[in-house]
Amino acid sequence: DADVTQTPRNRITKTGKRIMLECSQTKGHDRMYWYRQDPGLGLRLIYYSFDVKDINKGEISDGYSVSRQAQAKFSLSLESAIPNQTALYFCATSDSVGGEYEQYFGPGTRLTVT
Amino acid sequence: AQSVTQLGSHVSVSEGALVLLRCNYSSSVPPYLFWYVQYPNQGLQLLLKYTSAATLVKGINGFEAEFKKSETSFHLTKPSAHMSDAAEYFCAVSPSASKIIFGSGTRLSIRP
């Protein structure tokens, strides 16, 4: 079984709809991240969380919100989706203890906003 | 501010040829450096990482990268390309424990 899972894997939604992307991990890591990937732009950080009570904005947090329901779960919400939020979204985890900053990624969620 | 520049958004090599993917970084402190690979319809997978233990780093699938502080570079190489190496490759720098900054990616194509 995958260590970092994301649901759904694909989603098509309409402008103005609320949508939630979910991420779960079994790695036991304390840190979790949400990125979006756009062609030619690499990955850009949306939000990150160092533990359940520590949530921080990344470089492109406008239009997004997150919830860290438990150490293993980190969800990303689009309150009112817009077409330029069409992208590939990745969740990642890392370990603050003994880790050397590397992050482990889920398989991604392809979101299309029409 | 820390940043990563990958030279060439698309690199094409013949099967069996040398693979060279270029990465330059800027960082005000000694960084951790990474190469990640993304196969089609998959997430990113760690290929190798530099953590100051050795300047030549060996990774999975025969890839290696050399940290050159004087050139602020961390280029990725593989002596002989395989068809299975076709993927997108991301260089990344982590100046602190709070974040990783990714380059824009290089798509590697392998010609038969």
Image: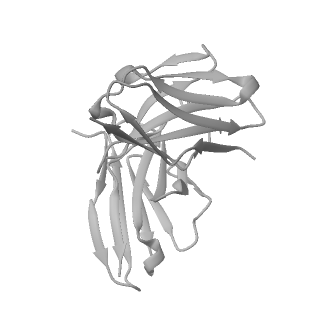
Task: Residue at 58% x, 43% y: name it.
Answer: B6
Compared with residue B9, is residue A11 higher up or lower down, i.e. above or below? below
- On screen, residue A90 versus residue B93, left or right, reads left
Task: Residue at 78% x, 36% y: name it.
Answer: B28
- In this view, the residue farthest toward the right is B28
Asked where in the image residue A89 lies, by quadrant, the reply is: bottom left
Q: Is residue A95 visible?
A: no
Asked where in the image residue A62 lies, by quadrant, the reply is: bottom right
Q: Is residue A54 visible?
A: yes
- In this view, the residue farthest toward the left is A1
Compared with residue A55, is residue B93 higher up or lower down, i.e. above or below? above
Residue B101 placed where, x, y %? 60, 45
- In this view, the residue farthest toward the top is B54
Compared with residue B110, is residue A108 higher up or lower down, i.e. above or below? below
Of the 4 image quadrants, the one containing the N terminus of chain A is: top left
- On screen, residue B11 versus residue A112, left or right, reads right
In depth, the one of B101 and B74 nearer the eye is: B74
Of the 4 image quadrants, the one containing the C terminus of chain A is: bottom left
Task: Residue at 41% x, 71% y: name it.
Answer: A86
In depth, the one of B52 and A96 nearer the eye is: B52
Q: How is the protein colored in the picture?
A: one colour
Residue A75 placed where, x, y %? 40, 60
- On screen, residue A112 versus residue A35, left or right, reads left
In depth, the one of A107 and B41 nearer the eye is: B41
Residue A79 placed where, x, y %? 45, 78
Residue B57 placed where, x, y %? 52, 18
Number of numbered labels in the structure image: 0
Task: Residue at 75% x, 47% y: name it.
Answer: B1
- In this view, the residue farthest toward the bottom is A16
- On screen, residue A76 versus residue A1, left or right, reads right
